[in-house]
Each structure stands twice: as structure tokens, then as C-alpha cells.
Image (spheres, grey):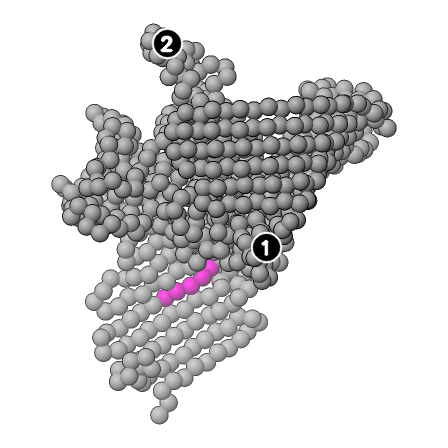
Amino acid sequence: MIKGLGILVDIGGTQFELSLYKGEDPNVPGTQVTSLLAAVHDEEGAEINLVSGLLSLLDDDPPTVTVDDSLTTIFLYGGSISYRKDPEGNLFGVSGRLGWKPKLQIGDIEIELIVDAQFQFYKETGKQIDGFLEGMVSSQIPGIEFLRVGARYDLASTKLYFLLQIGPLNLQAVRKRIPDPQFPDDPQKETTQFAFALANVPDFTLGDMLTFFVSLVDPSVDKFKFDPPWNFITDLPIGDLLDGLSLLLEFRPDGQKVVGFRKTVDFKLAGIYEFTAITLKYEGSSGTRKKEIKINLEGTFLGNSGGVGWDPVNDAPPEMPSQGVALFELRYLGLGQHVSIRNAQHAKDVGEIMRMLRGALSANEQKLLADRSLRQGDPASSILSDDSPVEFNAQSELLIGLDVSMLRFLSLSVIFNDPIVYGLRIELSGEGAKNFAGLKFEILYQKVTDTIGKYHIDLTLPDFVRHMTVGAVSITLPVIVVDIFTNGDFKLDLGFPWEFRFERSFALEVFPFTGAGGFYFNKLSAATATSTPKLDAAALEASELLGVFTPVYEFGLGLKIGLGKTFSSGPFRAEISITIQGLIEGVFSYYNYNYDPALPQHTPSLPERKEMYFMIKGGVALVGRLYGAVDFKVIKVEVEVMIMAMIKFYVETYQPIEVLLLAKVSVKASVKVLFVKVHFSFSLTVEQEFTIDSPQGSPADAPWYQYLD
């Protein structure tokens, strides 16, 4: 007896499948089933033109249609219809995958979008229709081709998910309706909540992040991984830190808007608390309600299954039965509307922006205390001075600055100033962080110009990974900093020793030899570079020139080689070394006469010319350093003696060559007992500087000299 029959036909790469089965279910012995499946598959996608295909059905000689075929053509990648019958009932199903690749013309720029839609619906006897509908959109726009956005709707849960994919990271936003406890059946009193979180991150590794960045340079790379013994770097799991962290947005029926964060946790202390999640919310004013900050710990606390919550601005945290670890410390909170952070696009990281906000708070507080009449004055003129890091800005929406510490080992800083800057910084330290102590991760978005934004990523690996000792060999891995601009420019910094400080660099010690180094490389354009001479656009326009420095390549390399040893154990740290240190930085670019990338051709009235621009600076130093520190918390002693002999140089196109000879001796010592600190320092510097004429000529001979700003 034939229990199964299947037919598979391949026509030009498109496969048609028809199968019928009747008999015992292979997965459930003793159960008789009947199943039918009809499906079509095409990996390349079968093209179906909806307009011309429909006209051909209506008319043998259809009229000519001038609509772009990309707008009316869809791609069929697959589809199926299934039926199953067993003793429990019937199951009907339908699924498919479609594509659409429209080409849109925006000015002189052609943009191709890629839309990928999938659906799956099935109906079981006695149950409602279940399944999902999902769609993703991507583009081939240079610089953001790794970005995909979409949405998904689940029929069973009636939840709508919004999806965002950035390389290997998948973010999703879930819409949830929360009924009012007093009126659970009244939809008019429901609160709508959106939870934005990373999806599928438990197995996410540092190698996945490196693969993403490497693929931006070489798209053929599918998996980036270091060979042993360095594979521990790319195998480092970082998903656990991101898993369970979500951004909350709530829209309540009374018009109140709430923003907050939620992190799933597993904190337990037998007999006292067992927390499963931490929620921090900012509730804006609405009607008679005032603005509030609320923190809520979900789980059980002192036998109460409802958890515990309080207002950290006006309330103290609940007292514990005995002294223990501080659960939450609010170090800074700044809120504002129609104010923005001045020069936020030039800030190097989230920490610098937080220092700017703290400075604005301290300065304004002192002004108000000194003159109470300022409280009734115009805040634009009485509080925010010209040098204030915060300024009034009608285009700026909400401003939030938050710096908190949790459990004495987790430090979290958040910057939100729509649409100027967004940032998140996470630091782990202390015994509570265990193996992740020393980890620092930062991601920052800054609006550079009206059309260009920058994503800044800063990563310091945990101490147990970054500092390794195997016998007499000590290895320190560098700090990783990556900047990606939305126009395709980028910066890469692997532990470059800025100002001859090698703490963030790669280091290798094989007693008694020591060495360290780092480098950076930037590929920029005229819109993002600041290292080339600044041109006056008005002067160029008056001369009918379109001069510009592009492309711009910046690089830096720093090395330290010598004899020495560093030691760190508990409260004691020490170093003794004598090293040769070298640092070199440079900029290479071309000054383009008569250049306009927006035009199909250069202006014919002037010839196209290029002239190289370069700047190289650096130095070599012989440095001897003796350092020691003991920190017992209550008492801290620190001593440093340093001797340096250095030669520095500066070479720039059409500029005199500068050479500096320097010798320096410095001694520093400090003693701190509780809150009292005694500091002593001594330094002596001898230097000699001289210049050499440039072989290109004087600065006035430079073709861009008369157009400098």
C-alpha cells in the first residue's frame, strides 16, 4: 500500500512540489494522519510584474505603460498550502515569502530599497487563526547598507513588534497594552507601552561585533576570528550584559508620557530579597501630577511579593535589616526641554558630556544662591551665559542626563538630547562584578552636520581578559575605539598613546624587557575632517572656485621599548622602567581646485588640479620612571619620579619646520588620610626650539592661503 507520494518539478530554477501522505505519524506512533502539501520555491525569486501581467490577461495587445518596472514587479521566493488531518481535528496552513525592489529617484540620487515580506497563517479545529506577518526593509545607500528596519505582527498574542537590525544586532520593540487595575475591561483607560530591547543576544560575542566592522571594509568576510591563543578575544561573550536590557516608552490615557529602562536581573539574599528585574522611569507632568522619577525592583522584598519601589529624588531607599551593598545611587539627573548641549558634536565621549552637564548645574546653582532675583528673571539671559555648556534651542526636544551606580559595581550613564546626541556608557568594577570587573562599553551618536551623524563606540575589555600573566610574560590588550560616520567616513583607534600615555595601549612584558604600542587610522572627507586648513567658503565663492581638501587620511603610531617591570597586587602598585618612546602622527590629503562632487562634471571654465597637503608631527623620548602606590582606602600614599629627554618635530606643507629639544625632571608625592590630602610636586624643564624654512616656500605660496578662514 502506497502511504506517500511526492512530485518535484524544476522549471528554470523554480521548483514546484506536491506531496500526499496517509498513514501512521512518524513522530507519534499509533496515530493515523493524512497530510497534503503544495509548494513553490525559487531562491533567486520569480519576477511577477503586476501591471503588465494584469493587462496581458485583460487584453492580448496591452497598451504601453511608462511606470518604472521596479515599482510594479514583485519577487516570489516561495509559498505553500498545507492540510493535515488527525484524530484531534484538521489543520490548514498557508505561508509565503515575497520581495520588492523599488528604485526611487531623489534629486540626482537613485536609491534602491529591498523589501522582504514573510507570512505564515494556520487554523486548527476549535482554535483561532494563528501565525505571523513580518516585513523587513533595507537599502543600498553607502554607509548604511548594514541597516534593516521592519515590523512583525503575531496573531496569537496580538502583539506588534518593530524590528531594527544593525549588522549582527537585532533590536525589537514590543507594543503592550496594560489595563487599569480599577477598570480592567475599559480599553479607554489602557496604557500603551513600547519596550525596545536587543533580541537573541545571549550567545553574542566580541567576535560577532568585530565581524560586523570588518565586513564594512571587506564584505566577503562572514566570520572573523583570531587563531589560538588569541581566539579568547573573539570568543568573549558580551551578550549576557545586553540581554534583558530594554527601553520603555508609555503613553497613558491621561496624556502622560513615561520613559524608562528595565533590566532583568537575578539578585538574591536569603530571607531578605529576591529581585528579577529593575525598572527606572521618568514620569512627566500631566494635569495635577508633578514630574517624578521612580525606581521599582520586581520580585520579593522582606516577604512582600510585590517588590519594592520609591522616588529616588525625594525618598530614601528602603532600609535593610543589616548593612549591605547599596542597591542604587543617583549621582546625577538632568532634565530639560528646548535646551541642548553646546558643541555636543565635538565631545569625545559620554563622560565628557556628563562633566559638561554637571558644570552647568554647579554654575547655575551658585548664581541662584548669590542672587535670588534671578529666579524671576529671563533664564536665557540670567542663568545661561555665553560660555555655558547648555544653551536654549527651539529645535531641541527632550534632554536627559542620567548617571547612576547600582550595587557598587555597575555604573550607568545615559545621554539623550533629541536630535543632537544619544549615548550609553556601562562600567563594571569591584568585587561584585567578578570576572567582568574593568569592562567599559560606550556607544554614542552625535549629529555632526545637518546631513551627517557619527556613531562612536569605545570598548575596554574586562581586567581578567585585558591583563594576562603567564609565567614571566605579561600581556595587556588595547582599548578599542571606532567612529563611523553616516557618509561612509570612519576612525579606528587601537590603543594609541595620546600624549605619551600608554595605559590604553597594547603592552608586552618579558622580564626585564617591556614594550607597548598602539595606532589609529582615519579615513575622512572635507565634511568631517578638522585637521586640514580651514577654508573660507565665502572667499572661494567670490573667486568662483570650488576648492576643498578631500579625501583626508589621518594616522598615528606610538611605541615604547625598554627595560622595566610593573607590579600590581591588591592595594599595591609599582613600576620601574627606562624606555625609549616614539610618537608620530600625520595627515595626508589633496587640495582639489574646482571640485564639486554634486556635479556630474567639473566646471569647464577652470582646469581641474590637485596639490598634496601633508602634516607630520612626532617625537622621540628617553624616559626613566619610578612609581609606587599603596591604597588602604583609609590611607593612600603615591610617589612618582620621572626623568625625560625628548626631541619633537613638526612638518607641514608650506610651513616652517619646527624642532624642539627638551629635558625634564619631575617628582610627585601625595599622602591621603581619610579626607585630608597633602600633595608635593617639583619639576624642572629645559628646552631649546629652532625652525627651518620649508622647501615648498612661504605660507603665502600655498594655493589655499588666500582662502583661509
| Residue sticking out furthest to the left | 182
Q: In front: mark 1 or mark 2?
A: 1
Disc 1 crowd rating (10 Å Cα; few below 14, some 14-19, many 20+) is: few
Q: Alpha carbon of mark 1 to alpha carbon of mark 2: how far? A: 60 Å
Q: Is residue 283 left or right of residue 133?
A: left
Residue of label 2: 370
Residue of label 1: 472
Please tell me whether residue 435 belongs to the stretch shown in magenta: no
Element marked by disc 1 = loop
* Residue 328, disc: none
Answer with mark 1 or mark 2, whichever residue precedes in sequence. Answer: 2
Find residue 321 and report its horizontal and vertical position in percent: 19, 41
Examine the residues drawn in magenta and state their main secondary structure.
Answer: strand
The quadrant of the rendering that contains the C terminus is top right
Taking depth in this image into account, of 145 and 589 the one nearest to the observer is: 589
Q: Residue at x 63, y 32 (%)?
A: 642
Amino acid carrying label 1: it is: Ala
Q: Residue at x 22, y 47 (%)?
A: 273
Amino acid carrying label 2: it is: Ala
Q: Which residues are magenta?
A: 94-98
The answer to which image quadrant residue 539 occupies is top right
